[in-house]
Image: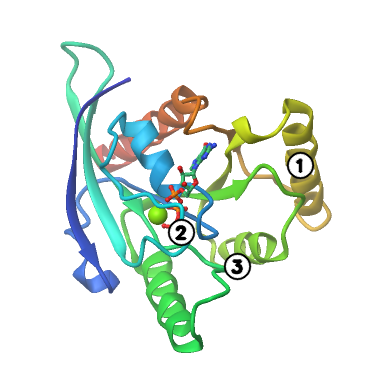
Amino acid sequence: MQIKSARYVISSALVTQCPKPDKPEYAFIGRSNVGKSSLINMVTQQKNLAKTSGTPGKTQLINHFEIESSTSDRGPKEKWFLVDLPGYGYAKRSISDRNRWEQMIDGYLRKRENLVQVFVLIDSRHTPQKNDLEFVNQLDKWGVPFSLVFTKSDKEKPAVVERNVKAFMDKLRETWQFLPRYFVTSAEKKSGREEVLQFILDWNKEVLAKQKG
Ligand SMILES: Nc1nc2c(ncn2[C@@H]2O[C@H](COP(=O)(O)OP(=O)(O)OP(=O)(O)O)[C@@H](O)[C@H]2O)c(=O)[nH]1
Ligand SMILES: [Mg+2]
């Protein structure tokens, strides 16, 4: 798949302010600093589409990007939304900020009607973290479809990444019968891009087929 264009649309504090839900939508969420904005830039092959930062808590609002893609040079174009969300688990945030985050994210995840998939990003350098496990369990309870993306895989040896991924999936297996799809990526090395894009493309196809009846 080729990305024909990617443009910033709007930043919203509430789901009611988000763009008209007329295109399939994919949202990136995860702990502060896990690499959500970097992954959006990697996937769209743009350096500064989403704002990244070494300091946690950079992304504060619901950021919509409109992407145009095509399966071949002359193939028809498809339009979809990518959404960069603010991260959770940022310790230095005040309680009122945290409540505001929770309201914004809960509202978005539960009410955004065109949301096809949520990508939950997890830092591949760490063993399973409580807040990540709690978050995916919450999504499961709400019935929000999601998959996992283990980020920053360039920062550790492949064996360590593999061990951490397995440990996370094993944790889920303790209570779940079906496991989500997962990806391993590095925004630095640009790895995992094709897999994530293909997954989105497959979903776009499915959504389109459903709309046609
Ligand atoms: N080595 C390496 N660094 C990465 C990777 N992805 C992100 N980073 C770095 O991690 C830091 C945080 O990246 P962001 O993309 O801003 O993270 P975020 O999840 O959007 O953060 P918030 O918006 O603050 O929640 C930046 O310094 C990035 O350069 C990766 O795959 N490999
Ligand atoms: Mg960000």
- The earlier-in-sequence mark between 2 and 3 is 2
The quarter of the rendered structure image containing the N terminus is: top left
Q: Which residue is mark 1?
A: 164
Using residue 207 as the reference point, say whether residue 6 is left or right of it.
Answer: left
Q: Label 3 crowding class (10 Å Cα cut-off): few <14, some 14-19, many 20+?
A: few
Taking the image as shown, residue 158 lies to the left or right of residue 65, namely right
Residue 159 x/y as whole percent = 79, 28
Residue at x-position 37% and y-position 32%: 43
Q: Position of residue 13 (x, y in %)?
A: 27, 73
**Cβ(mark 2) to ligand 1 < 8 Å?**
yes
101 with respect to 13 (left or right): right
Q: Quadrant of ligand 2?
A: bottom left
Residue with the most extreme front position? 54
Q: CA distance from mark 2 to mark 1?
A: 24 Å
Q: Are marks 3 and 1 in contact (CB under 8 Å)?
A: no
Tell me the SS state at disc 1: helix
Instruction: Give the number of the mark in front: 3 or 1.
Output: 1
**Residue type at the position of mark 1:** Asn
| Image quarter of residue 21 | bottom left
Residue that numbered label 3 is attached to? 138
Amino acid type for the residue under numbered disc 3: Gln
Residue located beneath label 2 in the image: 55
